[in-house]
Image (spheres, rainbow, N blue to C red):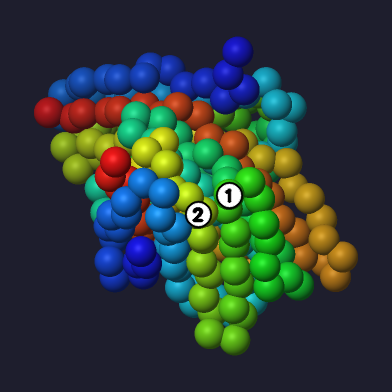
Amino acid sequence: DADVTQTPRNRITKTGKRIMLECSQTKGHDRMYWYRQDPGLGLRLIYYSFDVKDINKGEISDGYSVSRQAQAKFSLSLESAIPNQTALYFCATSDLRSLAGGSSYNEQFFGPGTRLTVL
Amino acid sequence: GESVGLHLPTLSVQEGDNSIINCAYSNSASDYFIWYKQESGKGPQFIIDIRSNMDKRQGQRVTVLLNKTVKHLSLQIAATQPGDSAVYFCAESGSTLGRLYFGRGTQLTVWP
């Protein structure tokens, strides 16, 4: 079974509709992330969460909201979808590891992605 | 073959050749770097990482080189195979928050 799952895998919706994308993980990680991927732009961070009910904005949070009610689940909502939100959306999880000297690192594990099309 | 990830986003190599994918980063405080591989229709998968106290790290058929002086990271793939065809992303982290910042990626195509 996959450690990080996303539902739905594909979604086509219309402008103005409310959409929710779900992410679940069985890795027991505290940290979860939502990214958006557009052709030629790589991965851009939308929101991230370091613990249950902890929410932090990423680079491109406008037009999105998230909810983290349980350690294993992190949902992304588009309150009123617009066509330029058409993209691939990835959820990721990580467990923070501390390095000597106070810095830290995390390897992030990604889900399979959700392809969202807004007409 | 060689590419600069941000300026030449595609790299084509012959099967069996070595591939070199390059990445420039801007934050001199970054102390942790990862290479991810993303195959078509899938999420990014971890390949190899390196910490800033190292210059080189080797995995199975892959080597990551870090040059902190010029803020440059490279991924070398030995004896490239068709299954290596994918988009490769570098990512950096440099704060206690542990956030990763991703490059735009390089599309590697391996020809038989």
Q: Check disc 1: other Cα within 10 Å, few if <14, some if 14-19, many if 20+.
A: few
> Which is nearer the eye, B50 or B64?
B64
| Image quadrant assignment for residue A33 | top right
The relative height of residue A73 versus residue B89 in the rendered view (above or below) is above
Q: Is residue A57 above or below residue B69?
A: above
Q: Is residue B102 left or right of residue B54?
A: left
Identify which residue is drawn at 35% across, 64% down: B1
Sooner in the amino-acid sequence: mark 2 or mark 1: 1
| Amino acid type shown at disc 1 | Arg
Label 2 neighbour load within 10 Å: few <14, some 14-19, many 20+: many
Provide the residue designation for mark 1: B61
SS label for mark 1: loop
Check if mark 2 and mark 1 are on a common chain: yes
**Front in this rendered view, residue A47 or A39:** A39
Does dot 2 land on a helix, a strand or a loop?
strand
Please determine whether, in this image, residue B58 is positioned above or below residue A48: below
Asked whether the viewer can see residue A90, the reply is no
Residue A65 percent across, percent down from the top left:
43, 37
